[in-house]
Amino acid sequence: MAVTINRFWCITIFGAVAFLFQSCTGNDRHANVLTLEALIENGEVIVIEKKDSVTLRPVIAFLNDSIYFTQTQYHSYRETKNTKSKGKMVPEVVIENSFALKNIFSGITYISDTLDSQSPVFVNEKNDLMINDVLFLAPDYTSKRMADTIFTKKIIDIKVDTKLKELDEFDESVIYKWTNTGRLGTIHKMFYYQLNGRKFKSTSSCYLIAENGNYFYNDKLGILKVK
């Protein structure tokens, strides 16, 4: 009996939450404003570092407002001897990460390497990097030496919103859709941004790359520039 009652209340609460979210959805306030995707398509916004909107790869994060890194995990195959197959060469799946450290404004690539999946990259407060116990020194990363200090922060843990601030909004965002894809569902928001007089709307967050007002970052599309 208790189980039945608990299930009843769970269903009731879930239904109430779903109704609340659905009742909060609203219409697009600015139907005449182009989407970010439309601006990219017609060439008014260009892509500097493309991110797959489905897989969200590569991972992109910023050390400051000009230097950023990309990291993509992929699978490769290599031939290895297998003792169970009497020493015959058999294919083995290897997980690796392609890593690059770049300057968004100069286009310089400081570091480009393929790393084993068990080889994390660390950063310190000076933005020096440590890869496989080798220290690459900021700001140009051409000087390197064996690391003799303790790094405690993995570079992969750097969040965009701790380094960059969200773009200015010319109107408040709206919840335009709610989908029942999980226990509490998924909220879909429409953001209304402006950058250097250009207004656009986006279903994913955008962040200003502060050193140059034409560059910005989008969660799903990558690093972009207003022409």
Image (tube, rainbow, N blue to C red):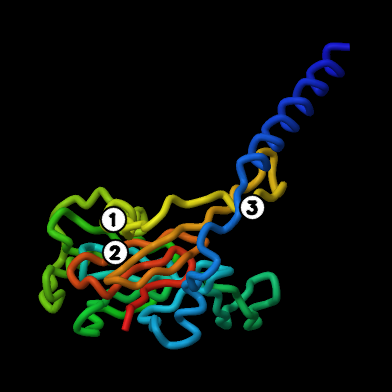
Is 204 situated left or right of 144 in this image? right
Q: CA distance from mark 2 to mark 3?
A: 26 Å
Q: CA distance from mark 3 to mark 1?
A: 25 Å
Task: Return the residue at label 1.
Answer: 165
Q: Earlier in the sequence, mark 3 or mark 1?
A: 1
Vertical arrangement, residue 167 with respect to residue 20, above or below: below
Name the kind of residue labelled 3 in the image. Answer: Lys
Q: Quadrant of residue 119?
A: bottom left
Q: Residues within 10 Å of mark 3 (few under 14, many from 20)?
A: some
The residue that appears at 89% across and 12% down in the rendered structure is 1
Outermost residue on the right side: it is 1
Q: Residues within 10 Å of mark 2 (few under 14, many from 20)?
A: many
Q: Earlier in the sequence, mark 2 or mark 3?
A: 3
**What is the number of callouts on the image?**
3
Name the kind of residue labelled 1 in the image. Answer: Lys
Task: Return the residue at label 3.
Answer: 177
Task: Return the residue at label 2.
Answer: 208
Q: Secondary structure at mark 1?
A: strand
Circles 2 and 1 in contact, beta carbons < 8 Å: yes
